[in-house]
Amino acid sequence: MAMVVLTILFSILVTLLLKHFYDTLSCYWFTPLRIKKIMKMQGILGPKPHFLTGNILHMSSLVSKTTSNDMKTITHDIVGRLLPHFLQWSTQYGKRFVYWNGNEPRLCLTETELIKEFLSKYNTVSGKSWQQRQGSKNFIGGGVLMANGQDWYHQRHIVAPAFKGDRLKGYAENMVECTKEMIQSIEKALESGQIEVEIGEYMTKVTADIISRTVFGKSYQKGNKIFNLLTLLQSHCAQASRHLSIPGSRFFPSKYNKEIKSLKFEVDNLLMEIIQSRKDCVEIGRSNCYGNDLLGMLLLNEMMQKKKKRGNGKSLNLQVIMDECKTFIFAGHETSALLLTWTIMLLAINPIWQQKVRAEIKSICNAGIPSIDQLSKLTLLNMVINESLRLYPPASVLPRMAFEDIMVGDIYIPKGLSIWIPVLAIHHSEELWGKDANEFNPERFSSKPFIHGRFLPFASGPRNCVGQTFALMEAKIILAMFISRFSFIISENYLHAPVVVLTIKPKYGVQVCLKPLEP
Ligand code: HEM
């Protein structure tokens, strides 16, 4: 009898091992070969990939070469510096080519019509690849940014109302308060004799305060702590994900993997404490709502859906609620800080535009603080923000994987192929923007008809940035208040050295010399 049981167990083990072996082979060998063959048949070629690493090593060596020196002058011609592999491969293979990010094949797409079609039509059958999800799993988990298919659809519908109508307007007060604090701390620095500041630090702090208050409301101090831990966690995850193309690397007991585990535990505990105390307050009757912030909205949704016994409404479980909070902190912070930092750099080197925008703010807003209704009247400021997002889009590329076979225009995209949209290159394309594509010219956003698919700082289609209106409202409030309080020029110490570390950053920050203006 024992022998029979052992034989059965052994057979199960062997079957599982064989299946695992076949899945690994299929993931690293058969599927990539199949995709390569299909693309070749359509005349879409690309650089030869290496086993496991694909074209990653070649890309990193090109990028480290082009970014090893700082730029000699402040020019916005940065595609060759940040996406040298794109320039090389598009010259060699044309507008469409396939390259390999490890074992993940990626089709580069720059044709605006095809981008528009892909981003508007295929949101539930395309999404974030295993590599992308794995790389961010430990710091944002399964929140809306990394969710796919029906899970994404469901989560998007739950979080989207947080960025609409009165709820959205309700965040303005926080934004003004946080900006006032930031301005006071700059004034203090100037009073102490400083004439120059690294403006990126202030923008990072103010956007962190705003997002912590938006997500956690009154619990924002704990929120700030979570924010700091998440920042550390994100950088560890970025280090660890460099080895993701090696099978099983995520299980190695490396220094990073150990620290990731303990940081994640700490963040989740802090989040759980906040959630539990809100739930307790409602349960014992000390409060009649879960809070007027984003977390409160998610908890209310969870409670209402649970109550709907017969309805088929799905609720978010606690882990997803925690992941959603982390997602908003991650997605809504660095991008906004960078938009503000690059815009201030652009205005610091373009004094005429700085004066024009200041005059506009003065003529529209009382004491430089815009009300919600005044925001839409700040047209010059809006044009400057768009031009800044065009030249320095915080998210320089958009990768999405096809989970089913699809047709985009005349291209047959097999399941498992990722579409890679090089936003930065599209934003700097002379073919799409004209001869002055690399110059700062906000006028281009004044009247020219909008060509769909060529301006993608927030992606587009149903899976665009859900926080776009929040981000633009925040940017206008902060910039309007800052510009009307200080005049500024770029410091001699500023070195122009944009780099891509997930987003486009100024390598050494942006140093500006400030002069307070009369209120
Ligand atoms: C200037 C600021 C911002 C920029 C340039 C930006 C850009 C983007 C882009 C390009 C995407 C699509 C990413 C992809 O699919 O791979 C995205 C998605 C997203 N963004 Fe933003 N974002 C900004 C600010 C914000 C803010 C302030 C929030 C929240 C408060 C936010 C929340 C999100 C979320 C949750 C998603 C995922 C949406 C989905 O997949 O349905 N973003 N953002």
Image (cartoon, helix red, strand yellow):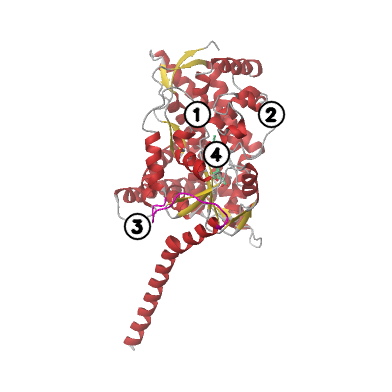
Look at the numbered discs 1 and 2 and tell me whether their residues touch, using CB distance below 8 Å.
no
Q: Circle 4 is placed at which residue position? A: 423
Q: Which numbered disc, 3 or 4, marks the residue that appears first in the sequence?
A: 3
**Considering only vertical position in the picture, is 355 above or below 182?**
above
Q: Marks 1 and 2, Cα distance to the nearest angstrom?
A: 22 Å
Residue 88 appears at what percent x and percent y? 47, 40
The magenta stretch spans which residues? 41-54
Which of the two marks, 3 or 2, is nearer to us in this view?
2
Say the numbered circle drawn on residue 448.
Answer: 2
Q: Marks 3 and 2, Cα distance to the nearest angstrom?
A: 52 Å
**Considering only vertical position in the picture, is 493 above or below 67?**
above
Q: Secondary structure at mark 2?
A: loop
Residue 59 appears at what percent x and percent y? 41, 43
Q: Marks 4 and 1, Cα distance to the nearest angstrom?
A: 14 Å
Residue that protrudes farthest toward the bottom in the picture = 1
Say the numbered circle drawn on residue 251.
Answer: 3
* Most common SS among magenta residues: loop
* Quarter of the rendered structure image containing ligand 1: top right
- The foreground one among 468 and 380 is 380
